[in-house]
Image (spheres, rainbow, N blue to C red):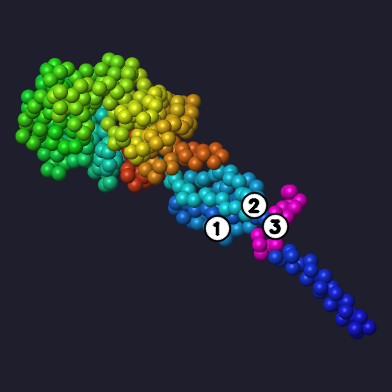
Amino acid sequence: MYLVYRKAVYIIFVIIFLITAPIIVLYTSGYRYNLNKGRIQKTGILIISSIPKKADIYLNGKKVENKSTPAEIKNVLPGDYEIVLSKDGYHSWQKKLPVYENFTTFAEKINLWKIASSTQLSNSIIETWQASSDDNKIAFKDSSGLIGILDVNDNTFSTIDTIPAGSILKLLIWSNNNKKILIQYVDGSINHLLVYDLNSNKTQAIENINYNNIKWSKDNDNIIYGKNNLGLWQIDISNNSNRLIVNEAVVNDYYVENNYLYGLSDKFVYRKNINDKNSITENIKEINCPSCNFTPNNSNRIILQDSNQNLFIIDPNGQTQPISAKAKGIDWLNSDTIMYYNDFEIWIYNLKDNVPKLITRFGQPISQAVWQPQGRHIIFASDNKIKIIELDDRELRNIIDLADNVNIKFLEINRKGNNLFFAGTSNGQAGVFELNI
């Protein structure tokens, strides 16, 4: 009997081994039994990270215990998962993503945005607002005639000048290197032109300014251009001298780059070499937009806009087809990527692809829109709210309300992408505000 008992125990253990060994091998190899599909499947992996870290992770409503971002979640059965990241003091993030057999699904560097209220920096009513191209400072004019600068790095205000009551500000623009500001205003019948130097904190008055449509040089912050009925003039503000560089009428708008005058007539965008007196005017593109203005940019494209929301993007070398669209505002991510928006749409246009991409349509008018500097989100104002939309188009794009009960006139974000600055009203109070996001 003892030998029979031992043989039975041996056989039972062999049977258990033959059953469990493949299961263990399959389990350690990442296979699991899928109750929903009634079969064994190879699992996948989820890799999730967030900014900031240590956000709780929920899969299909269940919290993943003992894990927070950043996390690698192994042995996840294939299927679609509703992923939610949650952290105290921040808006939650949610998206449905698929997990496939023997495949890794990534949801990395997810930005979680702060739940915060705006802070009033000034009660000034802002009438003109111009951010420097490096996003470090904002030049503005308020309703009292004060022209000043807001430094978005330390939230300090400084005064440039105060123009007389009743005068009309015609120009407030930064030089190409953001070291100087050009200010033009009309007081009665007198035309004033001032240059403010941020390094010296001094304002220089430019004399004999019988010019209109004044612009900075792209290459030298001591050079500005202006036109009159004689043609186009170059003004050296370092010695207050001028010279006529094109002795014929410059029609409508213009700009100068790399020794070429780019102009806009009633029918054509054209260019002319300003260093060659014998050069022939070259028509680049026929265009029906006599009220358009050139929009400064650092790309190799010509950008034109008018007050009727007409936008034209033209390759001066004719290698790509021009783009025409409806847009009341634009913002550059880099020299190759532009975001433009109209009353109800936001688009992205990559100059290399030459194909505009619709990001969203809204039922309420969009008043302002800017890139978040990392390039994965766009911030915009609509329906008395400041919203942020992600550009990850897997499933639905997340749209989060960062602030409500606001009326935005001007909107800007600092270079770090963590502070919004806006002029308008917030909770019934008018002025300039900061929102830490």
Verify whether residue 304 appears in magenta.
no
Which residue appears at 88% of the width and 79% of the height? 7
Label ID, residue 32: 3
Q: Secondary structure at mark 1?
A: strand
Instruction: Determine whether 134 is above or below 323 in the image.
Output: below
Quadrant occupied by the N terminus:
bottom right
The amino acid on which the numbered mark 3 sits, given as a three-letter code, is: Arg
Label ID, residue 224: none
Q: Secondary structure at mark 3?
A: strand
Question: Mark 2, residues whose alpha carbon is within 10 Å: few (<14), some, or many (≥20)?
Answer: some
Asked whether 372 or 92 is in front, the reply is: 372
The amino acid on which the numbered mark 1 sits, given as a three-letter code, is: Glu
The amino acid on which the numbered mark 2 sits, given as a three-letter code, is: Glu
Of label 2 and label 3, which has the lower sequence position? 3
Magenta region: 26-41
Asked whether 78 or 353 is in front, the reply is: 353
Of label 1 and label 2, which has the lower sequence position? 1
Q: Using the numbered discs, state the Cα–Cα distance from disc 1 to disc 2 in whole angstroms.
A: 16 Å
Verify whether residue 40 appears in magenta.
yes
Q: Is residue 325 visible?
A: yes
For disc 2, the marked residue is 101
Q: Residue 60 at what x, y percent from top left?
A: 63, 48
